[in-house]
Amino acid sequence: MLWNFHEVRQQQASTKFRRGDVAMLQEDVRRRHMWKRAVIEQLIEGRVGMLRTVVFRTPVGNKITRPIQLLIPLEVDQGREYVEELLSS
């Protein structure tokens, strides 16, 4: 299947999110290069036990809660020590 370059694909159920992962927050009112990046602080499950909501921390320290459908994971691996250091500050 061919994808348009500007399309945002729906997340697959096999995607695993963890506390400390870096992600982008999809926003319809901004262009993609201006979407916020944040670190996942908390994963909230729904009634059935499926992941539904995520609490993020932005670089300036704000906490944002968004549904999992608006989460776009970044493939960044800087070592767990670095991420834990960011979370503790």
Image: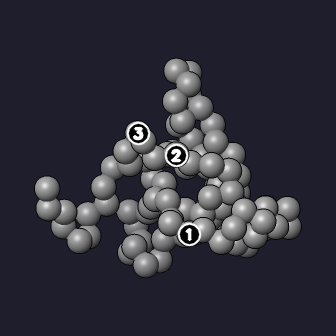
Q: Residue furthest bottom?
A: 33
Query: How is the model colour-coded?
Result: one colour
Instruction: Name the disc covering residue 13, or none.
Output: 3
State whether residue 63 is above or below residue 11: below
State whether residue 52 is above or below residue 41: above
Q: CA distance from mark 1 to mark 2?
A: 14 Å
Q: Say which residue label 1 marks.
A: 76
- Identify the residue at horizontal 14%, vertical 56% (top origin): 1
Kind of residue at disc 2: Lys
- Identify the residue at horizontal 47%, vertical 77% (top origin): 34
State whether residue 78 is above or below residue 18: below
* Residues at circles 2 and 3 in contact by the CB criterion of under 8 Å: no
Q: Residue furthest front?
A: 79
Instruction: Name the disc covering residue 16, or none.
Output: 2
Q: Residues within 10 Å of mark 1 (few under 14, many from 20)?
A: few
Q: Residues within 10 Å of mark 3 (few under 14, many from 20)?
A: few
- Identify the residue at horizontal 64%, vertical 42% (top origin): 43
* Residue 74 screen position, x and y as percent: 50, 65
Q: Is residue 61 visible?
A: no
Pointer 1 or 2: first along the chain = 2
State whether residue 6 is above or below residue 15: below
* Residue 19 screen position, x and y as percent: 68, 50
Q: Is residue 78 visible?
A: yes
- 49 with respect to 83 (left or right): left
Kind of residue at disc 1: Val
Q: Secondary structure at mark 3?
A: loop
Q: Quadrant of the C terminus?
A: bottom right
Q: Nearer the viewer, residue 39 or 60?
A: 39
- 12 with respect to 77 (left or right): left
Q: Secondary structure at mark 2?
A: loop
Q: Secondary structure at mark 1?
A: loop
